[in-house]
């Protein structure tokens, strides 16, 4: 399980079940286990501080490199 955090202010955004060792490029909606402070507005997924961490696509969030980091481990 990963906790995705804002790279700008370190706010916890959401908890994500990552399968596989690859990079976190897409976060599939069905594996977002818990939303903390993620703001989804139109096509943007962002932190309350305004940092855009990804773009909302049908079924997943296309994550923006460098806009977020995570703690925890991949399955
Ligand atoms: Zn932030």
Image: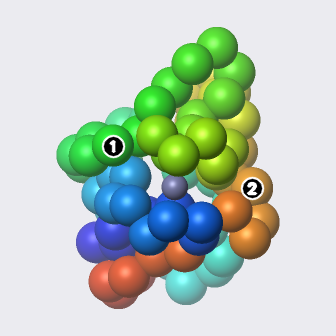
Q: Is residue 55 left or right of residue 28?
A: right
Relative to residue 22, is residue 66 drawn left or right?
right
Q: Is residue 20 above or below residue 51?
A: below
Instruction: Estimate the spatial distance between the alpha carbons at disc 2 and disc 1, rounded to whole Å.
Output: 17 Å
Viewport quadrant of the C terminus: bottom left
Q: Residue at x 38, y 82 (%)?
A: 71
Q: Is residue 67 visible?
A: yes
The numbered dot on residue 64 is 2
Residue under pointer 1: 37
Measuring from the top left, give residue 48's x and y in whole percent: 46, 40
State the residue lying farthest toward the top: 42
Q: Can you give x and y, in whole percent of width and height, for residue 69 in the image?
A: 55, 74
- SS class of the residue under badge 2? loop
Q: Is residue 56 left or right of residue 66?
A: left
**Depth check, front residue: 55 or 73:** 55
Foreground: disc 2 or disc 1:
1
> Residue 61: x and y, percent?
61, 40
- Foreground residue, 26 or 20? 26
Q: Secondary structure at mark 1?
A: loop
Count of residue discs: 2
Residue 61 shows in this picture:
no
* Residue nearest the observer in this picture, 61 or 12: 12
Classify 40 as above or below 32. above
Where residue 15 appears, as percent x and y from the top left, is: 30, 57
Above or below: residue 28 compared with residue 16:
above
């Amino acid at each position: 399980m990963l906790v995705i955090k804002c790279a700008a202010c370190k706010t916890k955004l959401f908890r994500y079940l990552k399968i596989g060792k690859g990079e976190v490029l897409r976060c599939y909606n069905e594996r977002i286990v818990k939303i903390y402070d993620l703001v989804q507005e139109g096509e943007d997924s962002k932190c309350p501080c305004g940092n855009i961490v990804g773009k909302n696509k049908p079924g997943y969030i296309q994550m923006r490199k460098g806009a977020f980091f995570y703690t925890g481990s991949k399955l």
